[in-house]
Amino acid sequence: MPAVHRREVIATALALSAAWVVAGPARATGRRVRQRPSAFPQGVASADPTPHSVILWTRHAPEGGRSGRPLTVQMAEDPGFERVVAETSVIPQLDSDWTCRVLVEGLKSASAYWYRFVEDGGGASRTGRTFTAPDEADLSPARFAFVSCQNINLGYATPYRRLIQEDASRPAAERIRFVLHLGDFIYEMIWSPDDQPVVQGRRVREIGPLPTGRKVGPIQVPTTLEDYRHVYRAYLSDPDIQEARALWPFVCIWDNHEFSNRCWQSQIDYDGSRPAQGLKVAANQAWFEYVPARVTGSTLGLERFVAPEVVDRPLTAFDDHGLSQETGNLAAVNSLRVARTVRWGANVELILTDNRSFRSRPVADTPDAAPFSVRGFPWFAPQDAIDILDAGRDYDNGRAPGTIRFDGRDLENTRRNAPPGSMLGADQKRWFKARLKGSTAQWKLWANSVGMLHRRTDLQNLPESVAARWPSEGYGLYGTDDWCGYPAERRELLSFIRDEGLTNVATLVGDRHSFFAGLLSAELPPGDYAPVAAEFVVGSISTPTSFEAAEAALPLGRPLSPIYLHADPAGGGVQPAMNLAIRHGVQACYALDRTGRIEDALAVRNDEVAPHLAFADMGGHGFALACADQEALEVEFVCTERPIAPASGPGGAEVLYRLSHRVEAWAPGDAPQLTRVAQSGRAPLVLDLEEGSQ
């Protein structure tokens, strides 16, 4: 680019909160700086690398007055900044909460760089390190970590410290090059220790109060942009989150808590579902300011977010994919479009989708599903009823039944003429299919914030001795806020992969606060089980797990306790019987409860419950490590102790177990095969005796 034009571009960017610069020949900086990280309390970050560019980020609030001052941004080939390759200026702005971003281009592919932000007086941020992506022809293995769900209000982000220490101890060629964050970067639901000092057995950490938040029971929730900014500032002040963002570029997608628990489109649902177009815009703006990414929408490039004017109105005029055409809703959900792809050499293309902004209302949360709600079975819903209700008029190739059998009665199917549910929405689904089909990477990895692997058990097979009856003729489905609550579109996408002959597809998932590994099939028994892709679900960094929720809410000794919890007389304490239930069925749980012997439990297992699951731990925290090359995709789960205390040493949380699965590249017409290739430590309940492959 001509030098004059380049100066004009940078001069324009200086008036905003972002800049653009092209790297040049390495040179010594010649400038004296001193570390002043206190002036940059949320640290530094880099994001969304390509072979020749990367985004840099920081926040620098003025220490007096309301005017931001220029920062010099330096990028170098060495941590001592003796070989600086790019340098420019940027001015943090009040309307971006003093955050700023810089796009550095002209970099070498597959290379490490160091960067910092420097004040006029020489005070410098901490030094960040980043990596560029390899060129698309580069056959080197792609190595990265994936994480999700970091709640520092109810825990500590110590698994990051374990990741940092372990990565530094590996040979350079085996270290990761980026971190994929699959959502729930923050939690907008804020507890205060003054109101409720313990939640699910954990001590509450003070990160509030929100500046203008409203109370909903024991929690505060945001009402303004400033509330969301407050939460991001608190989270990015955490030393372990900040350290990880300084060491690796992050590739981020959101889930629900960046906006609202159980959100869909611009709706929130705390004390009843209600329209919140203005709050959706505020949440999107805060994410844009604090989570650097190559996104589009109501933005001026990377420079700043321009909030559209919206009014909170009831959602109306739904299209055939359940997306409300109400003007404010469309403006809010499109104000930030985060679906995108990231290519990493010849081996990986990441396809990131937004699973919240365009989804139809989950059918399980509608009045149509109310007659099919189940009492006495916490967190379980009838799979057969959800399948029929969600599919609407498309069920059974257009032969939707007029009634659904439930609790001994034939109840009206009020959705027999309704369109099926959709998580992606029409436009995003077309884009996703095109990207999946058109990818030339060896591995098509879907950064899929919510899971597709079914968590179900055969509650219809409860022993006669149990004083409780499951009202459905089919399986019990654990949770309906993910793809299992949108079975029609789930089936459509998996059938698309099959029908197009697509191979080497895997989904990487967060949200569940659990570790899962398995294979994805459009149908499970009693239907035809035919896997077309693999899925790996990572445990939470610090959010309480489903097992912890069961421990806190469900007493032992009740008729249904054995399908949730198992009191271990030998080892002491309680173990997650739910792991056994969703792998091997309820008869196995009650056999274990009677004798305490895993062998007795497995002797009565139901192999039709989960032929798709190779592993499930609903009590796991930690991170996952992925390595993809031309031959295989291998994923290691690293499960750490509950993050209920700050790290006491450089290693962060202690490791409880490690588990690696491998799926080899497969040809069209073949089915994926998932094999367990390594295991150490002890996972809860049944891992030690489970099969090594499926």
Image: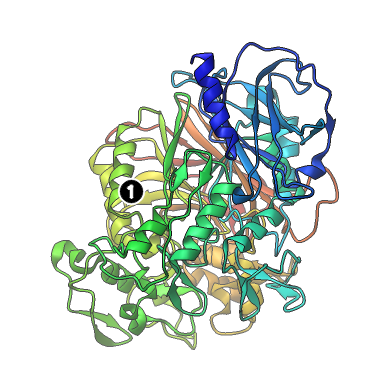
- Residue 494 visible here: no
> 2 left or right of 567?
left
71 in relation to 551, above or below: above
x, y percent for residue 557: 63, 83
Q: Which residue is mark 1?
A: 428
x, y percent for residue 125: 76, 36
Q: Residue at x 76, y 61 (%)?
A: 644
> 92 left or right of 323?
right
Say how many tags the image has: 1
Q: Quadrant of residue 432?
A: top left
Towards the viewer: 188 or 438: 188
Q: Quadrant of residue 82?
A: top right
x, y percent for residue 670: 31, 36
- Residue 693 visible here: yes
Q: How is the image coloured?
A: rainbow
Towards the viewer: 209 or 200: 209
Which amino acid type corresponds to the residue marked 1 in the rendered image? Gln
* Helix, strand or loop status at disc 1: helix
Q: Residue at x 37, y 63 (%)?
A: 328
Q: Residue at x 47, y 61 (%)?
A: 280
Towards the viewer: 288 or 428: 288
Q: Quadrant of residue 544?
A: bottom right
487 in relation to 504, above or below: below
